[in-house]
Amino acid sequence: MRPTGKLHLGHYHGVLKNWVKLQHEYECFFFVADWHALTTTYDDPSVIEQSVWDMVIDWLAAGVNPGSATLFLQSKVPEHAELHLLLSMITPLGWLERVPTYKDQQEKLKDKDLATYGFLGYPLLQSADILLYRAGHVPVGADQVSHVEITREIARRFNYKFGREPGFEENAQAAVKKMGKKAAKLYTNLRKRYTEEGDGEALATAQALLKEQQNITLGDKERLMGYLEGGGKVILPEPQALLTPESKMPGLDGQKMSKSYGNTISLREHPDDVEKKIRTMRTDPARVRRDDPGEPENCPVWQLHEVYSNDEVKDWVQKGCRNAGIGCIECKGPVTDAIKAELIPIQERAEHFENNPDLVKTVIQEGSEKARDAARDTMEDVRHVMGLSY
Ligand code: SF4
């Protein structure tokens, strides 16, 4: 996540709740992408530092747990830059120019000069961020799937160029023969189905078949695992996008909650300000007077009920709004209470970390060291296959 400073309920419902769940299901690496922040704020980097610590405090406050996941800072793991550089040597310019967000962002941030090398290369830096940890999955929203896709292409290109030992094809063919007639025929068939038709089931069956083989060496097994996927040894595995369900959390005006729209409730918002912000939210314009009936679908408060209220309350809103049985202030009561209640444990934890800045720094220091160990392992292999381990 880019360091954007204090986080809001949109981040919580869109990303952080999902991370809290994922940290118990996978081995997770969550990092602050501070170098990425430089691609668009290079003219004023002084804002980055505070944003980093504010964001990490909010992660911890939301329940992201350094005991379950590795939390670190990108710039503390210089291997990100090394892999980015090495991958840049094999990445065609056209791949980067075609990334949909490249032109979009340039359009959106017109007041900034983004005709820089760093900005063009940021999807590649993201690829390095992912491949460095040999990640199996990357939790992303639908708008980021193209970045995972380019990462897969880069990994494939890298493995193809550098994963093959000399004579790989011949050695693989010889290993197939050693399996015996029946298994060799089955393997060849399954490999064909996967490489020519992309049949994932055939790939899984072939992998299982290889595991069972008794009469070939471990080296041959590994070679044939790589051969299955069309290349040689897989140095950088291709990651999958793990699509994050889209957050329904609306901003105070009914648009997506975003700092740039000024419609946010931050995770550390004072309860009085939460009340004030909701009290002054606009409602259905048809309800000018208390006894004018309204329509929840035309009201941003209803969208909050959809996130926070149970069926009984939702029913009360629908009926009461349409027959003017309830007033808007009354209607806002349950969502105000629900948001305040949701923020209590988050703010208690945030206060603890705000009062212990050294603790936050230690979490990041330890996480960065752990991340660096994993990164070093990958880079050793990368340098080796690229002929750079001299
Ligand atoms: Fe919106 Fe509730 Fe007022 Fe209806 S009663 S307009 S849903 S705030």
Image (cartoon, grey):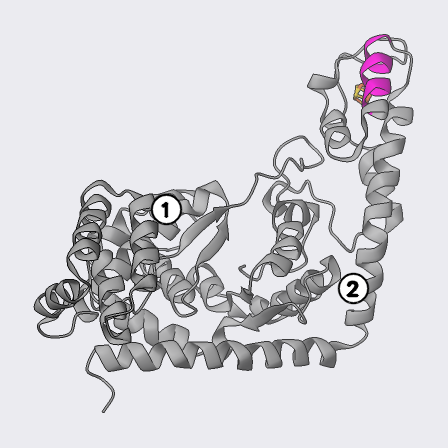
Range of the magenta residues?
314-323
* Frontmost residue, 106 versus 313: 313
In the picture provided, is 43 more to the left or to the right than 115? right
Residue 106: percent from the left, percent from the top?
38, 47
Q: CA distance from mark 2 to mark 1?
A: 34 Å
Report the residue marked by disc 1.
146
* Frontmost residue, 207 versus 120: 207
In the picture provided, is 37 more to the left or to the right than 57? left
Residue occupying the point 54% across, 72% down: 73
Residue occupying the point 27% across, 73% down: 86
Classify the position of the N terminus by image quarter.
bottom right
Report the residue marked by disc 2.
350
Residue 151: percent from the left, percent from the top?
34, 56
Residue occupying the point 43% across, 77% down: 375
Residue 328: percent from the left, percent from the top?
86, 22
Q: Nearer the viewer, mark 2 or mark 1?
A: 1
Which quadrant of the structure image shows residue 248?
A: top right
As helix, strand or loop, the secondary structure at mark 1 comes to helix
| Amino acid type at image mark 1 | Ser
The residue carrying mark 1 has its beta carbon less than 8 Å from ligand 1: no
In the rendered image, the residue lying farthest to the bottom is 390
Name the magenta segment's main secondary structure.
Answer: helix
Q: Is residue 91 visible?
A: no
| Amino acid type at image mark 2 | Ala
Relative height, residue 94 to residue 249 (above, below): below
As helix, strand or loop, the secondary structure at mark 2 comes to helix
Disc 2: CA contacts within 10 A as few (<14), some (14-19) or many (>=20):
many
Q: Is residue 378 visible?
A: yes
Please state the quadrant of the image where ligand 1 appears.
Answer: top right
Labels 2 and 1: the sequence-earlier one:
1
Residue occupying the point 42% across, 63% down: 130
